[in-house]
Amino acid sequence: MSYDLEVWTVETPEMPGMLPDPDRWDGSAGSYTRAGRGWQVVVTGPHQVSPEDVPDEVAEVLPGIGFMTEVSLEPMSAPRSAMQLAVKTARSIGRAAHGAVADPQESTVTTPSGVKRFAAAGRPDRFTVADMRWWFTDGRLLDSGGLDAFLGLLRHRLPEALPKRYGLFEPPQHRLEETGFDHFRSFLSEHLGDIVVWYPRRPVVNVSIHPEPDWGVGRLGFRCGYVAVGVESAALSQPGWQAGLAAFWRRASGLISPFYGEVRTLRGYIRSGASYAVDMETDESPTRGPFWRGVPRDPGQACVCSPRYLSLWPRFAEAAELDGDLGFVEVDDWLSEDTVAGVTGAVPDAIAQRHTPSWVRDPRHGGWVKSWNTAYPPAWPFGDPPHADTVRGVR
């Protein structure tokens, strides 16, 4: 029998250069061996892996894993020096290719020195956010099982999104490290209709989960469920984060089943203690919370649509990568100025917001106010669109 280690890495391990004393290994691409008296260490791989192939316990340690390399010591009864070589080899690969070492025998996952999930470098007064949002009517988040599944996705694939502290008022009265995950899950389920104060950890900035069982037209217009997760854009330049967030975006979309979702760059956030603040220089989502009034005219770096909008946006449907009944279009680099519009062209006027919200002078009281869009586009895939004279606008 052998003692096996798995090295899960973000970057491609280059063999044999990443092995300790590379000249002392025999083999070729795909397998390298270093032998002693009655034992050998064998390195096999790297094997390319998909996000769904990465175990949760590994994904919790590092985002964006793309490769797995096996390090085996044969036999298990080999001397201690041979075991030390196997461990040194695994750590050498992990350090060089930004990875984590999993020991199935001990059920542990560790990172070599110098390898971090997120390196919090500085706290600039203003920062930029990769803002992920989804809008939905029906789906799994309307029941407790779906909420549990989404919280599990956060726990394993974006653990920084779980709150350090949470509660119904400032400062939040509960600490996750004291109450535990099960209490947080029960608390959130009980208070989904309330405003929950939720302090995530960097680089996650904010998390909001708002199912809406009674979605539809009400006193303030059309209202639906929505989910928002904001992450400091600076994280995207660190190893694995672009790929990790893109994979999270896809899996979250499949779980939420939105009729529309997007990732867009929002600039000008202001640091404020454990949270953040905004002012007139801060970008905002053109859609105000749960009040859906059409597809934004300036889509961001990634978009997802259900058949409700795929049928009304032919160029998007043509360009989209389909996963079940959802269509995805996204640019490769979420830090770039490129947007989905460069792939799909302009959002069709029939489904677009009547205007993009902006700051305007208040003619009655002076000062500045945000002119939120209150009108509805003519193509409305939820039945008859609300009429402006029957609902009060949300401003």
Image (cartoon, rainbow, N blue to C red):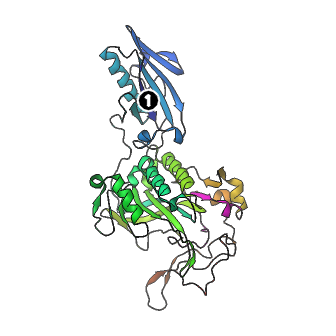
The answer to which of 156 and 263 lies nearer the viewer is 156
Task: In the rendered view, tell whether residue 239 sits above or below residue 200.
Answer: above
Q: Is residue 53 magenta?
A: no
Residue 171 visible within the image: yes
- Disc 1 is placed on an element classified as strand
Where residue 70 sits in the image (x, y, percent)? Answer: 46, 26
Where residue 175 sits in the image (x, y, percent)? Answer: 28, 57
Q: What range is drawn magenta here?
A: 288-312
The answer to which of 158 and 32 lies nearer the viewer is 158
Which amino acid is tagged 1?
A: Glu
Q: In the rendered view, does 296 fall on the left or right side of 98?
A: right
Task: In the rendered view, tell whether residue 97 sits above or below residue 332.
Answer: above
The residue under the point 49% across, 50% down is: 245
Pointer 1: what residue? 6
The residue under the point 31% across, 52% down is: 180
The residue under the point 49% across, 23% down is: 44
Residue 125 occupies which quadrant of the picture? bottom left
Residue 345 visible within the image: no
Q: Is residue 295 magenta?
A: yes
